[in-house]
Structure formats: structure tokens, C-alpha cells
Amino acid sequence: MILQATVTKYIPTNAYIYADNETKHGFLIDPGAQAGKLLELIREKGLTIEAILLTHGHFDHIGAVSELQETLKIPVYMGWARRGGSMPRIPSGISRPRPTSPSY
């Protein structure tokens, strides 16, 4: 299942949840704001979020990361190439991605 939630602090942006329909385990993508709203949706759907995935580091995509990471006790990942440009370093509270090799 893919769920979309529009969250707003400074500007509206979309956060997504991608979860397996059977196991209800999944990922939260780009939680830009309103951690409480996202947590309510996660609980309402009975989901287990394994990690937060960030497409890039703009403020409207990472605004709720610290609160969600602390509450859910999960890692946060962002691709190495997406760190550059307007965000020269990863903000505190966000885990640095760990290099992994595909297991296929």
C-alpha cells in the first residue's frame, strides 16, 4: 500500500508511507512536518515503520524527522548524491547512510 499525507509547516508538501499489505511493515518517505499527524496515520493503519527514507535534505522534507526518529526508534537514510547542493551536511539527529550491497 502507498499512503500519501499532505503536511504543512511553512509550505504544503507530501509525505508517503510505503508498506506491505500483508505484514504492514514499511517505510516513511520525506516527513516534512506534522509528526503527530503522521504518527496518528501510522497507528490508525496498524503499521510498523522500519526506517525513514529521504529523497533530499530540504527543510520541507526533513522537518519532522527528529521527532519521528525519536518516537519510533528507527534509522533515517538519504542517498549520498542527494546531500549536496542546498544542504552541505546532514543535520544533527539524522543518521548517515550506511553503504550496502544489493543481496540479489
Image (spheres, grey):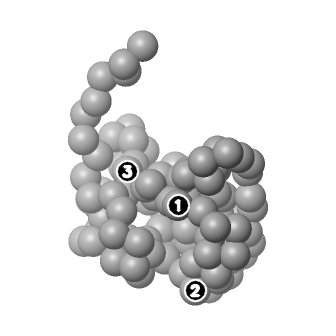
| Residue at the image point whose x is 75% and y is 61% from the top | 4
Residue 8 in the image: above or below residue 31:
below
Mark 1 and mark 3 lie on one chain; the one further toward the N terminus is 1
| Residue at the image point whose x is 47% and y is 68% from the top | 62
Q: How far apart in space, not on screen, are marks 1 and 3 (Cα)?
A: 17 Å
Residue 2: image location, x then y, percent: 73, 51
Mark 2 and mark 1 lie on one chain; the one further toward the N terminus is 2
Give the number of the mark in front: 3 or 2.
2
Give the number of the mark in front: 2 or 1.
1
* Residue type at tag 1: Thr
Which one is in front, 47 or 18?
Answer: 47
Residue annotated with mark 2: 36
| Residue at the image point whose x is 66% and y is 58% from the top | 16
Residue 54: image location, x then y, percent: 48, 54
Q: Give me the disc on residue 48.
A: 1
Residue 98: image location, x then y, percent: 24, 41
Q: Quadrant of residue 103?
A: top left
Residue 42 in the image: above or below residue 29:
below
For residue 96, side relative to residue 65 (left or right): left
Residue annotated with mark 3: 77
Residue 44 in the image: above or below residue 9:
above
Marks 1 and 2: in contact by CB < 8 Å? no
Q: Count up the numbered dots.
A: 3
